[in-house]
Amino acid sequence: MRDLNDDGALGRQMHAWLSALFPIVRSITGPGVRQTLAYLAEQLPQLKIHEVPSGTRAFDWTVPDEWTIRDAFVADEHGRRVIDFKQHNLHVVGYSEPVNRWISFDELNDHLYSLPDQPDAIPYITSYYKRHWGFCLSHKQRQGLKPNNYHVVIDSDLKPGMLNYGELILPGRTVQEVMITTYICHPSMANNELSGPVVATALAQWLTSLAKCRFTYRIIFVPETVGSIVYLSKHLEYLKKHVVAGFNLTCIGDDRCYSYVPSRAGNTLSDRVALHVLKHLDPGFMRYSYLDRGSDERQYCAPGVDLPIATIMRSKYGAYPEYHTSLDDLTLVTPKGLEGGFTALRKAIEAIEHNYMPQVTVLGEPQLGKRGLYPSLSTKSSGDAALVMMNLIAYCDGAHSLLDIAEIIGVPMWELIPIYQKLNEHGLVMDLNG
């Protein structure tokens, strides 16, 4: 697989996508989801957009009514909007039912949400499965409200509609699959929401540009939780038979440390690859346990589902101060951070694609010099390169995968892939996987 030019262009492109998607009012259903998927389909023409009607059963869940919101505000007695959804779409509690009436300050206060310990931040609050309404605001803004009557308006609909998701399948040489999944249901939050879809889109474009891969790639954009459950309810048996590895993409766009949440099993190919890539990219990465789960790995790794899905992130959800607030904005996610997230996933995919089962084809140590594979001048750097090649050959016994060997000899797998390929071209090693 080819390398990308390291000029920052990809990071800037992803950040431009993210900036275009940021203002869209998203939830688990509704026009914002469709608008988001339509934008992604402009970047990925093969993306198929599916719809599932409200009321559809999916395991223990039911697809909820669709939520549409047009406006929401709290106005004072002079008609001045003191809380205005059109100023920031986090100002309304997600899935708020419609309301239009005058109320006292005390009643309004029961429907307000703020963060005293983050007085400048607007919190992100939802009430998907219980009828409710409310407004979110900064604590500074809340403290400035007067004890007067207020006109409260939420112009919204909650009625039967559709849950939408996007799916892109890139056929490989085999029907075995690598699954990339991300979610498209949060409103304006950059790292927690949009970094996943834009990195997944860049990965899909990169994979599409390659000659046919060994594995088939299944890339899905779903509403978190209910969307992944709906998807599993439609495809579970096929996925269990064909998915050999996969990653959940979320919180992958800032430029802090890398993070990892394992699958429930903890020892899948996805887990081994994620740990290998991250320890060489960022030795100080944060390693969490499955007990720290909180995204859609909960669904993909649930008992009876047990797909090999791990999560590679930058700052983990819930572990950075801007999480689920208006501070998770376009300045928190950077082109460099997005490109770093893309690089980690690209290297993980390359490791899965090239995880050969190498078998040396000669007895004894092969004579590399006559094949031009051994350095003619002995220097420290040439000696190190020759040692890596010889150590690789030493474990090409048909019992160790290339990932196994990379771990044994302590070399990043992406450095071993071209060495293996050169040895293979000279007929010195073969892949028992075929």
Image (cartoon, grey):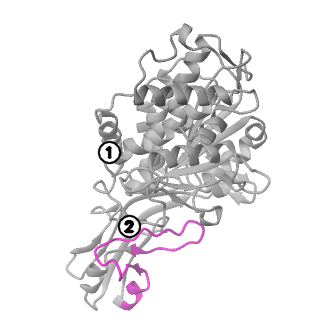
Q: Is mark 2 on a helix, strand or loop?
A: loop
Magenta range is 106-135
Left/right of residue 211 with respect to residue 230 in the rendered view:
left
Left/right of residue 328 with respect to residue 51 in the rendered view:
left
- Asked where in the image residue 234 lies, by quadrant, the reply is top right
Q: As drawn, which residue projects farthest toward the front?
A: 378
Q: Where is residue 91 in the image (x, y as percent from the top left)?
A: 35, 68
Give the class, few, some or many, for how many residues have Cα within 10 Å of label 1's Cα (few <14, many ≥20): some
User: Taking the image as drawn, is residue 163 in sight?
Assistant: no
- Give the amino acid at mark 2: Thr
Task: Give the number of the disc on residue 12.
Answer: none
Q: Position of residue 347 (x, y in %)?
A: 50, 36
Left/right of residue 235 with respect to residue 278 in the rendered view:
right
Q: Is residue 287 magenta?
A: no
In the image, residue 382 above or below residue 369: below
Q: Where is residue 26 in the image (x, y as percent from the top left)?
A: 44, 54
Calculate the distance from the C-alpha at mark 2 to the C-alpha at mark 1: 22 Å
Which residue is labeled 2 in the image? 325
